[in-house]
């Protein structure tokens, strides 16, 4: 009888879709086109900044798109059992075909058994080769319709809109076949998409509702934290009294930040854990020293939100090697503070910030204590910087650096005349390494033969001086190179 009543309560819910693919294959452009043509123009600006997901309307029916930061976040959610997406769109550019991240996405989708369709993008370009894409996808085990399989594919253009409506129709058809439903009579539940600390409003947590009806004033629980829904906003940032599946929502009222991918419910959960335990363990991890004979790079990670922090941490952890290692001293959410700088001084760490900034006090203290802080909105820029730091592990300390601003004479490698600015330390007549942007190891070595400041011959130059130097070097020096003198 109970099962019969439950089936009578079921109502259809919109599909939840995640878009994946290789970088620069048109994921963002496709999502932008869909959003701009399917959401009222007054609502378009900035609607995914806080929530990380949004609804569109197609053929009078709703579709929810999750705007994920990358494959790493999707994998992290899946590893916690978060069945967030009902369907994925695998984006493949028609002018580039299958690339490494395409293969990575295919692997993730197959392992998670997520149903997907293929969007072949940029079909408006003269270099588009749809047949090549089909053949290469088949070689990767993606069995397309007409090629021995049932995976639907659609050629689309984010410029002209060609094929986009057909793709959206297929999403709705797939939802009908899957018979996606929810029960409005049960406690609300779903998954955490993102979490951050807002200095004005406190803990902001974006969620996706999967079952039940989420209402303002409800208690809300995850395995690691709990709270009360004090403010409930839809994906447009508008206050809402209730939200049904598959609605994206922003909740204010959690006592602490939950983890990305955690399940939430309006019913209490057993075996709750303190999320700060993980942070405390990380703060002590530098004491668990790796073998002392291996150079170690200590890092303090800070990010704007939990999802960004986990993506950054996963990518940094993957850089560890047998010869050189790195150690994450601590990782937390928020701007970089003077407390982080003090921790860096105590542990000899470099501070890495993703999608955030350093407070004024932190900047001043870091400069006084000579602590390195690197920040960026692009995670791979931070990974590259950490790789460069790791490449320098074990090298003698830097005594002086010169940035090359001009090259005057290179008729002989043994008599190259270059001009530059001293970036740090003292620059004097001795041996040096040539470091080049984008190259992890030095590209050559040389020796300073003479130094001039204007017309005056000098023995050394301090930080900030612009000088000309005559060098004997094993490679042709380029503008942008750094000449690095080590102790």
Image: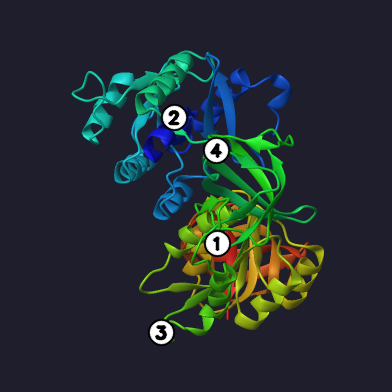
How far apart marks 1 and 2 lie (CA) works out to 87 Å
* In the foreground, 360 or 58: 58
Q: Earlier in the sequence, mark 1 or mark 2?
A: 2
Asked if 426 appears above or below 143 in the picture, the reply is below
Q: Which mark is residue 415?
A: 1
Q: Earlier in the sequence, mark 3 or mark 1?
A: 3
Q: Is residue 201 left or right of residue 177?
A: right
Which secondary structure, mark 3? loop
Asked if 428 appears above or below 161 in the picture, the reply is below
How far apart marks 3 and 1 lie (CA) works out to 44 Å
**Which residue is identified by label 2?**
8
Asked if 404 appears above or below 86 in the picture, the reply is below
Q: Earlier in the sequence, mark 4 or mark 1?
A: 4
Few, some or many residues within 10 Å of mark 2 (<14, 14–19, 20+): few
Residue at 49% of width from left, 32% of height from top?
A: 27
How far apart marks 2 and 3 lie (CA) works out to 63 Å
Q: Are marks 3 and 1 in contact (CB under 8 Å)?
A: no
């Amino acid at each position: 009888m109970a099962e019969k009543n439950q089936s009578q309560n079921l109502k259809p819910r919109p599909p939840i879709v995640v878009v994946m693919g290789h970088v620069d294959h048109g994921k963002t452009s496709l999502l932008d086109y869909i959003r701009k043509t399917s959401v009222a123009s007054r609502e378009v600006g900035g609607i995914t900044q806080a929530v990380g997901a949004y609804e569109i309307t197609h053929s009078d029916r709703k579709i929810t798109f999750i705007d994920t930061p990358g494959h790493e976040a999707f994998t992290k959610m899946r590893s916690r059992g978060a069945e967030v997406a009902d369907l994925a769109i695998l984006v493949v550019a028609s002018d580039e075909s299958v690339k490494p991240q395409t293969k990575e996405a295919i692997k993730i989708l197959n392992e998670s058994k997520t149903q997907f369709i293929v969007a072949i993008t940029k079909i408006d370009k003269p270099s588009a080769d749809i047949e090549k894409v089909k053949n290469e996808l088949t070689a990767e085990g993606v069995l397309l319709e007409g090629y021995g399989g049932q995976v639907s594919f659609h050629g689309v253009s984010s410029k002209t809109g060609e094929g986009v409506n057909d793709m959206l129709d297929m999403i709705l058809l797939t939802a009908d076949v899957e018979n996606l439903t929810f029960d409005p009579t049960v406690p609300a539940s779903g998954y955490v998409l993102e979490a951050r600390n807002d200095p004005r409003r406190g803990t902001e947590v974006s969620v996706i509702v999967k079952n039940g009806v989420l209402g303002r004033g409800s208690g809300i629980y995850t395995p690691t934290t709990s709270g009360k829904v004090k403010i409930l906003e839809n994906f447009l940032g508008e206050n809402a009294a209730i939200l049904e599946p598959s609605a994206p929502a922003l909740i204010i009222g959690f006592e602490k930040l939950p983890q990305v991918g955690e399940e939430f419910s309006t019913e209490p959960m057993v075996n709750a854990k303190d999320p700060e335990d993980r942070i405390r363990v990380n703060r002590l991890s530098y004491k668990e020293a790796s073998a002392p004979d291996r150079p170690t790079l200590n890092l303090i990670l800070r990010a704007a939100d939990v999802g960004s922090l986990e993506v950054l941490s996963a990518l940094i952890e993957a850089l560890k090697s047998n010869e050189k290692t790195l150690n994450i001293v601590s990782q937390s959410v928020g701007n970089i503070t003077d407390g982080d700088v003090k921790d860096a001084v105590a542990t000899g760490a470099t501070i890495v910030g993703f999608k955030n900034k350093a407070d004024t006090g932190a900047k001043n203290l870091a400069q006084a204590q000579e602590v390195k802080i690197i920040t960026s909105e692009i995670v791979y820029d931070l990974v590259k910087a950490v790789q460069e730091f790791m490449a320098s592990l074990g090298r003698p300390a830097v005594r002086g650096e010169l940035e090359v601003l001009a090259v005057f004479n290179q008729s002989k490698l043994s008599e190259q005349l270059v001009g530059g600015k001293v970036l740090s330390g003292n620059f004097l007549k001795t041996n040096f390494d040539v470091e080049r942007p984008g190259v992890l190891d030095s590209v050559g070595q040389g020796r300073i033969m003479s130094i001039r400041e204007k017309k005056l011959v000098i023995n050394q130059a301090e930080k900030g001086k612009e000088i000309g130097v005559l060098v004997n070097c094993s490679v042709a020096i380029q503008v942008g190179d750094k000449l690095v003198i080590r102790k």
